[in-house]
Amino acid sequence: MPKTLKGHSGAVTSVAYSPDGTRIVSGSCDKTLRVWDTMSGTPIGNPLQGHNNTVRSLAYSPDGTRIISASGDIWIWDALLGTPVGQLRGDVAPARCIAYSPEGTRIVSGHKHGRIQIWGAVSHKPIGKPLHGHLGSVYSVAFSLDNIHLVSGSIDNTVQLWDVVSGAPIGQPLQGHSDVVNSVAFPPDGTRIVSASVDKTIRIWDASGEPAIGSTGHGSLVFTETSSRRTGDPDSTPVFTSDVMLHSDGWLTTSGGQLLFWIPPEQCLGIVLPPALVVISQSTQINLDRFVHGMRWTLCRTDGS
């Protein structure tokens, strides 16, 4: 039977297992953290107090000795004693999300106004200047397992890949979500990125930072080398493969602004466009086998069609 852990006086906003699986830490709107025994479901010690606002994000260090939590401010706690051991202070806006690097030597935090900061886990000092790229608050951050890349999701509806050493963005923001991106993660091999959004979809992206031809998930619109041709020139080079844009009003255009066709906006959430690889959402399937387009619309119909 599932256990119900009770102890917070407000909504629970974040949870994490300790690396050895024997403990769980939770953060709440009651401004506290609690540590729980996994087997018994009972709280261990008193609530961890110090934050002045909702605890929005937390994590165990890879060795299990520390807990970090973000609530505008960022606190570091002794995971066994439940006592604070320091705060991360820098010239950045309030923090919304937090994560440890896989080897535990660095911490990354996401902030309001689109800022991301990397910190020394031991020194508690900023490493380099804040990373700039998002146009709004950063809601989720994660390191790749090899410590080479970071990924972030934002209220600006985009996902961004970063180089950890240089702090530079890799490629353009990954666009496709129509609402806040509130969770991002890497798989163990680091070749993909997964993102979850308020738009009710989960998207899987190529983590190389390069455009890629999409493959189908639950809903799909995939562009390949045989997807389209111009009217009156069936042997012409395909005019859209990965170089297309889906706008919020439902129009699909080339990067140069040429209108291709319109999709009802309520069906757009199920569309796969590069560099997304998969969209887990409602089903949207469009057959482009006989799709033609161009200025000479009378040629769109041929004998027998």
Image (tube, rainbow, N blue to C red):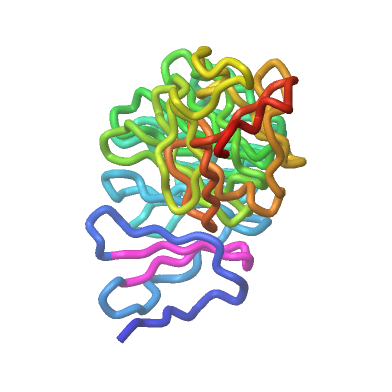
Quarter residue 3 falls in? bottom left
Question: Which residue is located at x 56 percent, y 62 percent?
Answer: 13
Task: Tell me where residue 120 appears, x and y as whole percent.
Answer: 43, 28
User: Of helix, strand and loop, which mostly describes the magenta segment?
Assistant: strand
Task: Tell me where residue 33 appears, x and y as whole percent.
Answer: 50, 62
Image height of 60 relative to 54, above or below: above
Q: Is residue 33 magenta?
A: yes
The residue range painted magenta reads 23-37
Q: Is residue 82 magenta?
A: no
Quarter residue 204 falls in? top left
Image height of 297 relative to 156, above or below: above
Q: Nearer the viewer, residue 138 or 275?
A: 275
Quarter residue 205 falls in? top left
User: From the image, which quarter does the N terminus lie in?
Assistant: bottom left
Image height of 62 relative to 7, above or below: above
Question: Which residue is located at x 29 percent, y 80 percent?
Answer: 40
Q: Nearer the viewer, residue 95 or 294?
A: 294
Whether residue 69 appears in this view of the structure is no
Task: Tell me where residue 5 appears, x and y as whole percent.
Answer: 43, 79
Q: Nearer the viewer, residue 87 or 71?
A: 71
Whether residue 214 appears in this view of the structure is yes
Question: Which residue is located at x 43 percent, y 28 percent?
Answer: 213
User: From the image, which quarter does the C terminus lie in?
Assistant: top right
Seen as rendered, the residue at the extreme front is 303
From the viewer's perspective, tell me whether residue 169 is left or right of residue 40.
Answer: right
Task: Tell me where residue 227 appears, x and y as whole percent.
Answer: 49, 29
Seen as rendered, the residue at the extreme bottom is 1
Question: Which residue is located at x 46 percent, y 47 percent?
Answer: 68
